[in-house]
Image (cartoon, rainbow, N blue to C red):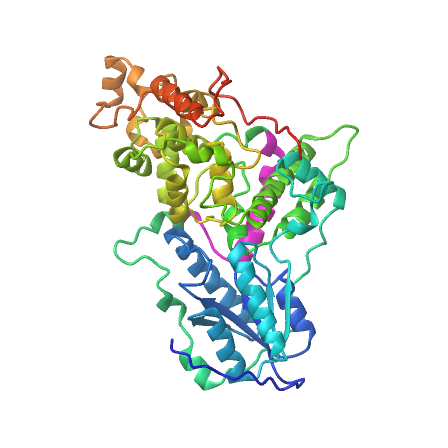
Amino acid sequence: MPFVEVRLSPKKSASAPVIVWFRDDLRLADQPALAHAAATGQPLICLYIHDPQAAGERAPGGAMRWWLHGTLAALDAALHEQGGRLLIMEGAQDEVIDACIAATGATGVFWNRRYGGKEREADAALKARLRDNGLTVESFNGALMYEPWTVLNQSGEPFQVYTAFWRACRRVGDPPPPEPAPERMIFQSLPAGLTRNASKLADLGFLPQKPDWAGGMREAWQAGEEAALERLRTFLADDLEAYADERDEPSVAATSRLSPYLAVGAISPRQAFAALKHAQHGRHGGSPTRRETSAEKFLSELGWREFCYYQRFHWPDLAERNLRAAFDAMPWRRDAKGLRAWQRGLTGYPLVDAGMRELWHTGWMHNRVRMVVASFVAKHLLIDWREGEAWFWDTLVDADGASNPANWQWVAGCGMDAAPYFRIFNPVLQGQKFDPRGLYVRQWVPELAGLPDKMIHQPWKASEAQLAEAGVRLGKDYPLPVVEHDMARQRALEAFAKTGKGKHLAADDDEEKPKRKGKS
């Protein structure tokens, strides 16, 4: 949309509106910017800006665009129920806000903070400029339990070890309780000139056209704040008790599946924390119950999300640069064929292929399998972790600018408090341990469904009779492995040695998630 330079001359009036700028906080409850704007008693303009070229912001991938469409539609419907609407504008963020102020006489702008480096710079510059023009501009914490600059070690430096970071967070105490949606909101009638320039959600191009690849995602997910809260309630009521014991089994629905909602802010971590605490203390006993143990485990996963955002704040180039500089010398391979086989779920390793097919179909993948497939890229194929991270960014409905790169760096060994590079997940052993009956593989790699349990994670070891009975022709119905595990492991260790950090290598290549140790 075309914009012209405008002179900001806000009129100080109780009837003048204020703007609530929605970004990655697409909800009404526990929405600090919305709550503070409503508390002014002034009419509200609820604004969402689609700026495809926003400085410093990473354009959302295909799956996230689809997810955003549904979430924005749900937010608009929720505002309609309150008598308002979501004003969607397309263009440069500063220009859109200036145009909205000029058209409506808005005297204030409220938003929740972002934590990427260039995002913070852009927000700070906009805040300073608007304040210089006499507007009230306030920003708030709507995304985290503990803001990154409030948690530092005794030297005043950022923590580099998760356990030390999370202990420090917990010493601060519980985060503030979540606030309900404002009881009273007055909405501004928008001038015709502004609404003419508004964009319709359908015009943003967030939905796939031809081909429509989102059918599986539509089956798997319901977007919006109400769906997020229902998912949280269901998890706490039905799945929490088994969480600690079963969360690593991909065939079991034991995880929260809240990550897509957290990624777009349809729910806040404070809401999850408060509901979890309520559920944790719902039962009492002389010793920790299974439910309480699971609650603590889930709380630590919320803490890990905080640690990912903490890294993004203190190391803004998280998605581009190895946080451990030694990995700059890593001799990554260019392997377009191997990368394509991985993306399509045709590596010949059933657990890896099941995960990649689940990802393509639903826009999501079980966390245990995420670690295995990421390790396969960086260690079996020796492909730069950034190539795998980019594929996840495009295909995940929970693609998140902090969690996605931080977790890829963790698996690759180059991130903060990362898994050592020499710990190489063996996809066969991982499948046998966490999918022993092959239920997950049978769901997503149905061509192997007829194989016996002992062979389903290593079909190349099945006898001719077993393959014939299952109707599997290796190399035709299902591929042979794109790389042999022992060879790939040795190649990865030799490559790691070239970084100067691989002098003392462990023999066990299938360690579980290591206990995080080290100086903070």
Q: Position of residue 238 (x, y in %)?
A: 59, 40
When asked about the image quadrant of residue 514, the answer is top right
- Quadrant position of the C terminus in the picture: top right
Q: Residue at x 48, y 15 (%)?
A: 507
Q: In the image shown, does 13 or 63 lie closer to the viewer?
A: 13
Quick check: 112 left or right of 289?
left
* Marker count (numbered): 0
In the image, residue 220 lies in the stretch drawn in magenta: yes
Residue 466 placement (x, y as % from top left):
27, 15
Residue 33 against residue 231 in the figure, above or below: below
Residue 152: which quarter of the image? top right
- The rendered magenta stretch, by its main secondary structure, is classed as helix
Between 520 and 510, the residue placed more toward the observer is: 520
**Does residue 226 show up magenta in the picture?**
yes
The answer to which of 394 and 252 lies nearer the viewer is 394
Residue at the image position 69 percent from the left and 46 percent from the top:
151
Left or right of 451 on screen, residue 176: right
* Horizontal relation, residue 463 to residue 498: left or right: left
Read off the magenta span.
218-244
The quadrant of the rendering that contains the N terminus is bottom left
Q: Is residue 519 above or below residue 261?
A: above
Q: Position of residue 414 (x, y in %)?
A: 49, 34
Residue 457 in sight from this viewpoint: no
Is residue 58 in view from this perspective?
Answer: yes
Q: Where is residue 394 drawn, in percent x and y?
A: 38, 48
Q: Residue at x 60, y 54 (%)?
A: 143
Furthest residue in direction right, as rendered: 286
Residue 241 sits above or below residue 397 on the image = above
The quarter holding residue 276 reads top right
